Image (cartoon, rainbow, N blue to C red):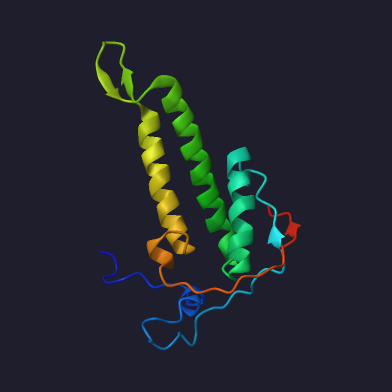
Amino acid sequence: MGKRGMKPQPTALRILRGNPSKLPLPANEPQPKILAIVPEPPTWLGEVGQSVWREEAPKLHALGLLTAVDLRALALYCEAWEELFEARKSIESHGLIATSEKGGEYQHPAVGIKNKAIQRIKQFGAEFGMTPSSRTSVTASKTTETPKSKHFA
């Protein structure tokens, strides 16, 4: 059985929200350093995934939510977008319903891939405060500096 109650939020996100629970911030939580620059997307990501990375990574960096230990989670978020894009292309070409050799109809496999990708996008997005409900009380100051890039493999 999993843990009960609300999932803990990263301290950086709690601080951005003004610590609404007013509970003490964890004293021993590991604090990875914020990256000095925004890394380039991993080379194994496809074109769509790399595009999502280039769009989202600078935003997360500006909020102080992108550290070296977060890069793989962000890459998986971007990969899920890639899978969603590919599944939607397949559905547009082949439709929602597939027909077996014996004439039976069933849900096209791309529909399941699409649905799973959407769930992963929502889960990883919430981890980074990228969904409406996960950022309802975030108050972050805007930065005018555009982060530079460095390659991340």
Quadrant holding the N terminus: bottom left
Residue 121 visible in image: yes
For residue 93, side relative to residue 35 (left or right): left
Compared with 23, 150 (above or below) is above
Residue drawn where x is 28% and y is 65% of the image:
2
Q: Quadrant of residue 4?
A: bottom left
Compared with 78, 124 (above or below) is below
Judge by depth and name the residue closer to the eye, 81 or 147.
Answer: 147
Q: Quadrant of residue 111?
A: top left
Q: Check the image and name the residue furthest to the top.
A: 102
Compared with 149, 96 (above or below) is above
For residue 84, side relative to residue 42 (left or right): left
Residue 46 visible in image: no
Residue 96 placed where, x, y %?
34, 26
Residue 137 placed where, x, y %?
42, 72
Residue drawn where x is 45% and y is 85% of the image:
25
Judge by depth and name the residue closer to the eye, 3 or 23.
Answer: 23
Judge by depth and name the residue closer to the eye, 55 or 115.
Answer: 55
Residue drawn where x is 60% and y is 74% of the image:
32
For residue 42, side relative to residue 123 (left or right): right
Residue drawn where x is 50% and y is 81% of the image:
29
Residue 110 placed where, x, y %?
40, 30
Residue 146 placed where, x, y %?
72, 63
